[in-house]
Image (spheres, helix red, strand yellow):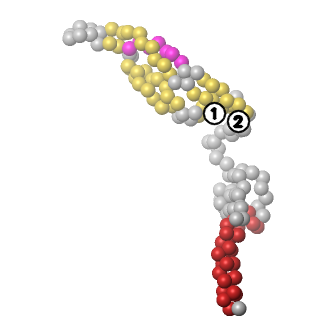
Amino acid sequence: MKKALRVSVIALLCLFPVAVSAQPLPVPPAPGSNTPPTQGNVTGFPNTFPHPTNPWTGVTNPNRAIQGSVIGYIQIPSQQVVIQVYVPGPGSFSGGYEAQVIEIPGYVVAETTTGYIYPPRWGLQEVTPGVYQWVPLPEQFQAK
């Protein structure tokens, strides 16, 4: 009798973690969603629901543009640009300018309800006449 009880207790202990782990984990509400701050949500995910007396609650960043929702994407193809590059002459002879074709890579612009989001991309900058360099252009938002 005692042996059967021990075996059943061991079997239950082995099965208990499996039964507990089979339950799905709770999913936190998406930031900015209209999920009500119920006791279970606030206890499980306190960073999603800040306390109303915190000084930053309800304050938006005035420097941040309201980008809206994405409604489509616009493919910007690569562009070929003809630039005038300075080529120095041999020895003490003066040089001259020569036409050179450069291809600027394409990118994808996200169109939103309030404007356009340009991704980080590469651009060409003229440092001095006849001298160019590649520069990284930052991500930016352009309002409609």
Nearer to us in this view, 31 or 125: 31
Decide: is 18 above or below 81: below
Q: Residue furthest left?
A: 91
Q: Residue furthest bottom?
A: 2
- For badge 1, the amino acid type reads Ile
Q: Is residue 84 magenta?
A: yes
Q: Which residues are magenta?
A: 79-85
SS assignment for the magenta stretch, majority: strand
Kind of residue indicated by mark 2: Val
Q: At 70% across and 57% down in the image, what residue appears?
A: 28
Q: Nearer the viewer, residue 91 or 22?
A: 22
Q: Residue at x 65, y 75 (%)?
A: 14
Mark 2 lies on residue: 70
Q: CA distance from mark 2 to mark 1?
A: 9 Å
Crowding near the residue tagged with mark 2, few <14, some 14–19, many ≥20 C-alpha atoms within 10 Å: some
Q: Which residue is mark 1?
A: 117
* Residue 50 in view of the camera: no
Q: Which mark is residue 35?
A: none
Of callouts 2 and 1, which one flags the residue occurring earlier in the amino acid sequence?
A: 2
The label nearer to you, 2 versus 1, is 2
